[in-house]
Image (cartoon, rainbow, N blue to C red):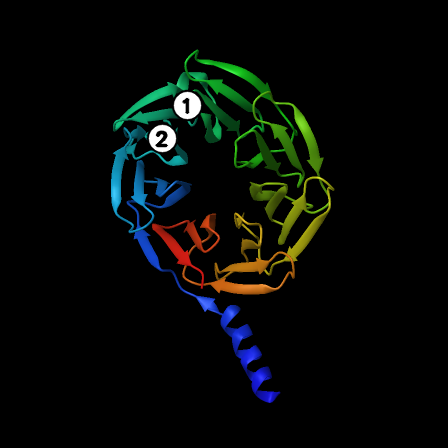
Amino acid sequence: MKYLLFLSVCASLLWSGELTPQHIIEASGTVQQIALVNDKIIAGTSNGTLETYKLSDVTKLSKIEFPKIKDFTADEIAPKVFSVDMIDKTLLAVVQTSSGARELYLVEEGKPKVIIDAHANLFISKAKFIDKNRILVALLSNELFLWDIKNKKEIYRIQPNPSHFSDFALNENKTMFASSCESGEITIIDALNGKISTVLKGGNVDNVYKVDFKKEKVLCAGQDRRGIVYDIGSGGFERFDGSFLIYAGALSPNLNLGAFAFNEQNDIVLFDLISKRKVHTLKGQKSTLNTIIFASDKELVSASDDQFIMIWRLP
């Protein structure tokens, strides 16, 4: 009996132990955001670069450099690349401009092309492909619009909440998205027509920095030190309290695990969403986490406010 108890304790410690990254990628500048598409990691940096790496062996596949801009002293600087995405072989990037606004770029065959330029005077925070011809674009004003690439026009524009925009996440088939803001409320919206489906509230009482959306679950990473996982159907939620502001989070594809940037040491803590038990702590990021993405149920990718992208493998 004692032997069985010993084995059980050892297994529990192994399962809930600390993990270090399997691979570390050093980008050309501070990583602003990453995206994961198929077997590729796409990174936008503060050094004006859009970089693509192969997930399986961290090989650098491409590096695009955007034109330098002038700062308020008229000195030339590299623009920040705030948001990135990819569909097939086409890359998407939100890039800083001299005016303070931001431009939206497509990159095809290594050649950047502006599709929304600085003259539109838009402060774009994030942009993601819906399909080859449509892009969901979010502004800092918390206005979101669907952009028709071919016809160069908006299909719809909405403002789901008057509070400052924070983040949005598309579901797996890109038909719906969850949008977060400083109010703490989460708005579920039809990505194709802009109609609001439901509003989730009660979990967070302050800014929700990041959201993830898989199946009927939405994960929220909150300034109020709360990690929240909503069930869209019921509107109910589970709460995971951190010891510091929770800047990033993600759901595993099978919805068994939730990952949160959980403390001041920039550790990522993984929870079993059924038992609410901590199962792993991922140690290695040195700066404030800005993105966590599950590549599979056993593999994660994370980035923080420095040059390092980390790939983690779960036992």
Give the residue displayed 25% in from the left and 29% down from the top.
110
For the question of whether residue 222 can be seen, the reply is no
Say which quadrant the N terminus sits in: bottom right
Give the residue displayed 64% in from the left and 33% down from the top.
188
User: Residue 177 in the image: x percent, y percent?
Assistant: 58, 33
Give above or below for 292 relative to 109: below
SS assignment at label 2: loop
Query: Dot 1, how many residues are within 10 Å of its Cα: few (below 14), some (14-19), or many (20+)?
Result: few
Q: Which amino acid does label 1 sit on?
A: Lys
Which disc, if any, is residue 200?
A: none
Tell whether label 2 touches label 1 (CB within 8 Å): yes
Q: In which quarter of the image is residue 164?
A: top right
User: Residue 267 in the image: x percent, y percent?
Assistant: 48, 60
Among all residues in the image, which is located at the extreme top? 151
User: Residue 159 in the image: x percent, y percent?
Assistant: 62, 25
SS assignment at label 1: loop
Q: Distance between the residues labelled 1 and 2?
A: 8 Å
Give the residue displayed 32% in from the left and 30% down from the top.
89
For the question of whether residue 289 can be seen, the reply is yes
Query: Dot 2, how many residues are within 10 Å of its Cα: few (below 14), some (14-19), or many (20+)?
Result: few
Q: In this view, does 105 lie to the left or right of 122?
A: left
Q: Is residue 170 left or right of residue 205?
A: left
Say which label, 1 or 2, has the lower sequence index: 2
How many numbered discs? Answer: 2
Residue that mark 2 sits on: 88
Residue that mark 1 sits on: 132
Q: Along the line of sight, which residue is nearer the eye, 156 or 75? A: 156
Q: Is residue 150 left or right of residue 184?
A: left
Q: Which amino acid does label 2 sit on?
A: Asp
Give the residue displayed 57% in from the left and 17% down from the top.
156
User: Residue 284 in the image: x percent, y percent?
Assistant: 41, 61
